[in-house]
Image (tube, coloured by chain):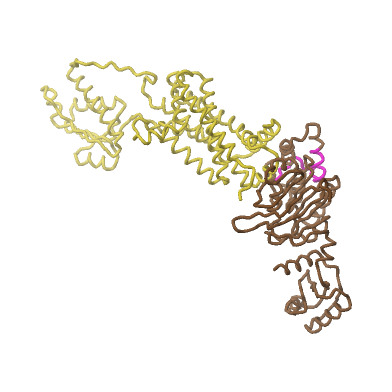
Chain colours: A brown, B yellow
């Protein structure tokens, strides 16, 4: 990778709170213009990492830079070159939509001649043109999040950090939000986004799986799905899935069995279809599970994640 | 400091203040309410001291004595008792502060030119009132003695007393300027004590410190609107003092506003400092109350004279900024003091303002606490 093409670089980053390592020896690089996802359950260290990169927390050790600026010594320089959207909505609830935009436009010193244009861009992008004089507190969460994104991108920074931007938002708004992320990334902006939604992770160019402060796996969604699982994943539709799940989880030959809706995903050691198929049929038979439908599937990121975490634990 | 960013913060604060009834009440209703309440209630003059009389004589002379006491304005005769016991129970019940017993031979002795004793009993549980009351009573009795004997004593030493600055010796004339100083201290500190803590509490600070805004831009930007509110409060207080309490104002308005501005910056700085430390509005509010109310009322010389304090307290009063500000306001209001007389106090207040702003700037960190 060419030096100039790297927007964010982290090497052996550690952040300890007392004895607890919230971020434990994490290394990765993000290319310019990439949509980079940080995926992991709550408390995995995603937010801590993002706060270090935004210059809000000082790391304990390791290296980190955003653009050409160091996270230890140049946090204020970093703040000039990023946009940050925190996990909790943190614009001013008691101001109107427009007043929030004007405030951040002043704080980011958006040039006079561009001020109006940028404001209109945010209003249009967030679909808030009609609601520009509405008090921010009265907006639904989806709109609030888009307004927050707009305010973080008013000054068109080269890197954008979004911490769980779609948390608590309905699925349609989430999809809309990702369209916005793409449109921003299309203009060459690097987007670093954390999420605990597996389906969203598939929208990222590259992904890092984070668990208990450690980086478990790094790659494109396809790479993660292909390489990370040894064996194959089968989807079973059956009667009494809860009972079935229970007996499958007890079966030694099953690496992993988990419930996805009313269907069960089971991971078995064989990758080749014939061998795996025979084993699965045998297991289901022996556990007296009344199968309605059975098929081999491409593992979802969730399958990957569950199996990787199981390995770690 | 960049003007664009400073202005963005100032404008935003104004918008938020205009929508926050709590701040508006604190900014305007509290100081006006305090001034009126304290202006009327805190008076160190004693008037209408409740007096009980047991007049055994009930003669023209004895009634004349009671009437002359009432006319002095210092006493009001609350009740007449018909026995010694009755008089004592009035004191016990707290109905009267002073009891006067006029003996049955009062008029007889006066007429024959004999010396006559009247017994007075004072309720000493309120020592201050009792002392002053005893003084007033002695004076009033002397006056009445002179009147009935029709003599004029010529003592060898005659003190010609002239009171300067507060000729009528009205305590409100010096209490009101002191009160204005204390109100400015409390309001200044309270107003800003919430501004930083509020942003932490609502989570808006996290967004703000991820931007290139400088600490000084944030702190000064938040100071400006509250400075204006504080100056409006001062104007209101001075107007109330002049119009309602009719206190004299002999000095320069310009000097008063200038010095008050300096003091206000210091008080706002204290609030800002507290707000940065506390990070929660509840704690900040309590800290602001403790740091302003106690020193403001007790250690500033506002009510309790500093020269009567024990030595170690006197030393502490030197670091209470309100002490200097009260001295300045009383000087400007009553004596018409100018800059030349007050320059040491003004210098100390300027130092106070600079130090507080400096500290606030220094301790505000654009990082999250670990």
A178 versus B136 height, above or below = below
B74 versus A256 height, above or below = above
Residue B252 drawn in magenta: no
- Is residue A204 toward the left or the right of residue B312 in the image? right
Q: How many marks?
A: 0
* Picture residue at 76% right of the left edge, 71% below the top: A259
Any part of residue B254 in sight? yes
B292 versus A170 height, above or below = above
Q: Nearer the viewer, residue B367 or A166?
A: B367
Q: Nearer the viewer, residue A108 or A180?
A: A108
Give the magenta range. A118-136
Furthest-right residue in view? Answer: A274
* Picture residue at 19% right of the left edge, 22% below the top: B145
Looking at the picture, how far across and down is residue A206, in whole percent? Answer: 82, 56
Residue A123 drawn in magenta: yes
When asked about the image quadrant of residue A224, the answer is bottom right
Any part of residue B236 in sight? no
Q: Quadrant of the C terminus of chain A?
A: bottom right
Looking at the picture, how far across and down is residue A102, in whole percent? Answer: 74, 37
Q: Nearer the viewer, residue A205 or A165?
A: A205
When asked about the image quadrant of residue B194, the answer is top right
Looking at the picture, how far across and down is residue B312, in whole percent? Answer: 36, 36
Q: Main secondary structure of the magenta part?
A: helix
Looking at the picture, how far across and down is residue B205, in whole percent? Answer: 65, 44
- Is residue B73 toward the left or the right of residue B62 in the image? right
């Amino acid at each position: 990778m060419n030096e100039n093409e790297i927007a964010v670089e982290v090497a052996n980053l550690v952040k300890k709170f007392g004895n607890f390592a919230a971020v434990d020896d994490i290394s990765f690089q993000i290319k310019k213009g990439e949509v980079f996802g940080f995926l992991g359950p709550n408390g995995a260290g995603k937010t801590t990492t993002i706060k270090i990169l935004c210059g809000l927390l000082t790391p304990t050790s390791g290296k980190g830079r955003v653009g050409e600026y160091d996270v230890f010594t140049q946090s204020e320089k970093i703040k000039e070159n990023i946009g940050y959207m925190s996990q909790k909505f943190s614009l001013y609830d008691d101001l109107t939509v427009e007043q929030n935009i004007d405030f951040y436009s002043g704080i980011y010193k958006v040039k006079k001649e561009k001020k109006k244009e940028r404001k209109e861009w945010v209003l249009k992008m967030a679909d808030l043109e009609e609601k520009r004089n509405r008090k921010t507190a009265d907006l639904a969460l989806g709109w609030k999040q888009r307004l927050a994104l707009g305010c973080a991108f008013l000054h068109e920074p080269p890197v954008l950090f979004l911490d769980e931007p779609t948390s608590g938002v309905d699925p349609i708004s989430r999809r809309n939000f990702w369209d916005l992320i793409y449109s921003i990334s299309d203009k060459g902006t690097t987007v670093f986004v954390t999420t605990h939604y597996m389906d969203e992770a598939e929208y990222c160019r590259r992904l890092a799986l984070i668990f208990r402060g450690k980086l478990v796996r790094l790659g494109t969604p396809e790479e993660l799905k292909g390489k990370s699982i040894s064996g194959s994943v089968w989807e079973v539709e059956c009667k009494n899935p809860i009972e079935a799940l229970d007996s499958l989880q007890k079966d030694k030959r099953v690496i992993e069995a988990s419930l996805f809706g009313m269907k069960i995903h089971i991971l078995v050691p064989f990758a080749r279809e014939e061998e795996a198929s025979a084993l699965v049929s045998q297991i289901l038979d022996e556990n007296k599970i009344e199968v309605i439908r059975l098929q081999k599937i491409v593992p979802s990121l969730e399958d990957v994640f569950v199996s990787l975490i199981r390995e770690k634990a | 400091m960049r003007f664009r960013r400073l202005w963005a913060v100032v404008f935003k604060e104004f918008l938020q203040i205009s929508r926050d009834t709590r701040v508006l009440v604190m900014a305007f209703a509290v100081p006006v309410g305090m001034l009126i309440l304290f202006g009327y209630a805190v008076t160190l003059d004693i008037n209408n001291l409740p007096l009980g009389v047991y007049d055994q004589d009930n003669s023209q002379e004895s009634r004349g004595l009671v009437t002359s006491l009432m006319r002095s304005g210092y006493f009001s005769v609350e009740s007449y008792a018909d026995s010694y016991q009755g008089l004592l129970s009035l004191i016990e019940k707290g109905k009267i502060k002073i009891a006067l017993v006029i003996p049955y031979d009062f008029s007889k002795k006066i007429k024959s030119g004999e010396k006559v004793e009247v017994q007075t009993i004072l309720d000493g549980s309120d020592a201050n009132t009792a002392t002053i009351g005893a003084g007033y009573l002695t004076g009033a009795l002397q006056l009445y003695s002179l009147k009935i004997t029709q003599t004029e004593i010529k003592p060898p030493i005659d003190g010609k007393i002239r009171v300067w600055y507060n000729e009528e010796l009205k305590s409100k004339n010096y209490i009101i300027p002191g009160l204005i100083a204390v109100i400015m201290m409390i309001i200044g500190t309270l107003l800003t004590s919430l501004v930083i803590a509020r942003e932490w509490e609502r989570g808006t600070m996290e967004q703000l410190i991820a931007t290139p805004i400088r600490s000084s831009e944030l702190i000064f930007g938040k100071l400006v609107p509250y400075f204006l509110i504080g100056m409006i409060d001062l104007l209101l207080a001075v107007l109330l003092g002049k119009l309602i309490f009719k206190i004299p104002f002999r000095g320069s308005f310009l000097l008063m506003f200038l010095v008050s501005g300096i003091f206000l910056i210091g008080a706002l700085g204290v609030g800002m400092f507290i707000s940065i430390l506390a990070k929660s509005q509840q704690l900040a509010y309590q800290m602001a109350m403790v740091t302003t109310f106690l020193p403001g009322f007790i250690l500033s010389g506002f009510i309790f004279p500093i020269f009567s304090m024990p030595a170690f307290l006197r030393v502490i009063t030197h670091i209470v900024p309100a002490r200097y500000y009260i001295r300045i306001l009383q000087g400007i209001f009553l004596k018409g003091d100018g800059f030349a007389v007050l320059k040491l106090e003004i210098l100390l207040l300027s130092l106070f303002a600079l130090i507080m702003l400096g500290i606030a700037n220094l301790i505000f960190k654009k990082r999250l606490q670990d």
